[in-house]
Image: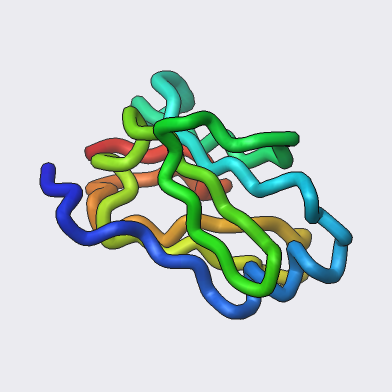
């Protein structure tokens, strides 16, 4: 698993953060063990970045990724989807070999 290519955040995701007034908080995207496929995404607003976080920023909006999660999110895209089933931040992860129906759990 390579992490040479950092994840990217779409314009739509940054726009949604601005729309909900997230700043000065930031969106944390983390990968944890668990879920029906082995790993799961933990996406939440957080007050501050940790010293070793990767910080992706645009127009005052920030997305944080911890160094443990970073290899699992190499070349991933963090987006915002507004669909019939609901509106949410989503991760399009090319490293995932399988995922659950809700999109929050995956395996590598």
Which residue lies most toward the left here? 1
In screen coordinates, is 64 left or right of 26? Answer: left
- The quarter of the picture where residue 20 lies is bottom right
Which residue lies most toward the top here? 34
The foreground one among 51 and 3 is 51
| Residue 80 image point, x, y percent | 64, 67
- The quarter of the picture where residue 37 lies is top left
Q: Give the residue at x 75% y 63%.
A: 17
In screen coordinates, is 50 left or right of 5? Answer: right
In screen coordinates, is 83 left or right of 29? Answer: right
Q: Give the residue at x 32% y 41%.
A: 70
| Residue 10 image point, x, y percent | 53, 74
| Residue 41 image point, x, y percent | 50, 37
Which residue lies most toward the front here? 51
Q: Give the residue at x 67% y 35%.
A: 48
Q: Give the residue at x 21% y 60%.
A: 5
Q: Quadrant for the C terminus, please.
A: top left
- The quarter of the picture where residue 19 lies is bottom right
Does residue 102 lie above or below 57 as drawn? above
| Residue 107 image point, x, y percent | 29, 37
């Amino acid at each position: 698993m390579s992490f040479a290519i950092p994840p990217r955040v779409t314009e739509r995701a940054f726009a949604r953060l601005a729309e909900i007034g997230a700043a000065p908080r930031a969106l944390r995207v983390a990968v944890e063990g668990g879920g029906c496929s082995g790993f799961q995404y933990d996406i939440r607003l957080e007050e501050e970045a940790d010293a070793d976080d990767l910080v992706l920023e645009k127009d005052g909006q920030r997305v944080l990724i911890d160094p443990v999660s970073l290899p699992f999110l190499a070349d991933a895209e963090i987006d915002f989807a507004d669909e019939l089933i609901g509106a949410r931040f989503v991760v399009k992860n090319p490293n995932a070999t399988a995922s659950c129906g809700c999109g929050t759990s995956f395996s590598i």
